[in-house]
Image (cartoon, rainbow, N blue to C red):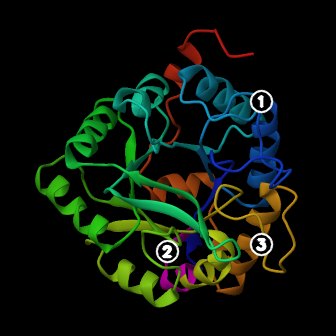
Amino acid sequence: MDPCVITCALSGVAANRDQCPGIPYTPEDYAAEASRAFDAGASVVHIHARYPDGRPSFRIQEYCAITRAILDAAPDLIVNYSTGAVGIPIEQRVHHIAALRPELGALNMGSMNYAKYSSKRKAFVFDFVFSNPFSDIIYFVEQMRSMKVKPECECFDTGHIRSVMPLLEMGLLEPPTQFSLILGVLGGAPPETRTLGHMASLLPDRSTWEVIAISREQWRLVAAATALGGNVRVGLEDNFYLPSGDMASSNGDLIAAAARIVELAGRRVASPAEARALLSLPDPPDRNCLYAWGTEVAT
């Protein structure tokens, strides 16, 4: 029974508690959600920071306070920071990684239309261009390499997978490379199992990968990724709903459902120590920068 790494995407930045009451806002909320996710089988948490009123934050202060609270509640968790943002200076998209040095940092591998469409309204809920030119990608990689943070290559389509190849040739990325295959964002790959299988087949040798499936198609794709030997990510950033169609009350509910699928596929849920070994991460992790960073936090 080979282990499967389960990542929990705790909050995202787009949704709010009017849409899903379980979304964390404060460091204490994040800690409680991370603890529930860990107890249910998560070994990695993906963090987008927020101010305590729920607004997205890109400041180091919020990332620091949230991460410390999470690790106080669940010290073994692997920490993964987002760098995804629109309209934010490039330095602010990565400065929290440079300052706090999580184990993993998201590396978006290409530009794309990024939209959500409502069939009921016959209108777009939001519509923007997510810009990630190679010059920005290289800047992010160099920042992560200098801080010994492993990039997590987020690929929203097949072309993004190919974009990793020059970075490998340049020596900016090294195998085993970690990929996140993201399906279900309008403008990117559709949330279909055959699409996931094709994307997985394009990955270079000595790669590890997980699926990130947006909205209620998540569960079929979690099952497919588990069967294909991949890892999985679920959480309130990506989907609010359980396989039954009921809204999850917490991230822990979603992780428990993913763990059940993993077990039904004949695999077992990886522990944090196993996840670090599978993802080629140091064990124990170096938390010195996180706890040495200045004491000023947002209130």
In the rendered image of this protein, does residue 81 appear above or below residue 203?
above
Q: Position of residue 73 (x, y in %)?
A: 78, 36
Residue 123 occupies which quadrant of the picture? bottom right
In the rendered image of this protein, does residue 269 appear above or below residue 294?
below
Q: Nearer the viewer, residue 85 or 101?
A: 85
Report the quarter where the C terminus lies: top right
Pointer 3 or 2: first along the chain = 2
Residue type at mark 1?
Answer: Asp
Left or right placement of residue 21 versus residue 138 in this view: right
Task: Write the start and end of the magenta stretch as one range.
Answer: 225-232
Residue count near mark 1 (Cα–Cα under 10 Å), binned few <14, some 14–19, many ≥20:
few
Q: Secondary structure at mark 3?
A: helix
Q: Secondary structure at mark 1?
A: loop
- Do tag 3 and tag 2 residues touch (Cβ < 8 Å)? no
- Do tag 2 and tag 1 residues touch (Cβ < 8 Å)? no
Residue count near mark 3 (Cα–Cα under 10 Å), binned few <14, some 14–19, many ≥20:
some
- Nearer the observer, disc 1 or disc 3? 1
The residue positioned 54% from the left and 14% from the top of the image is 293
Residue count near mark 2 (Cα–Cα under 10 Å), binned few <14, some 14–19, many ≥20:
many
Q: Nearer the viewer, residue 233 or 1?
A: 233
Residue type at mark 2?
Answer: Gly
Pointer 1 or 3: first along the chain = 1
Q: Secondary structure at mark 2?
A: loop
Label at residue 53: 1
> Can residue 271 be found in the magenta stretch?
no
Q: Position of residue 198 (x, y in %)?
A: 37, 85
Pointer 2 or 1: first along the chain = 1
Residue most extreme to the left: 170
Instruction: Write down the residue under mark 3.
Output: 257
The residue positioned 69% from the left and 75% from the top of the image is 216
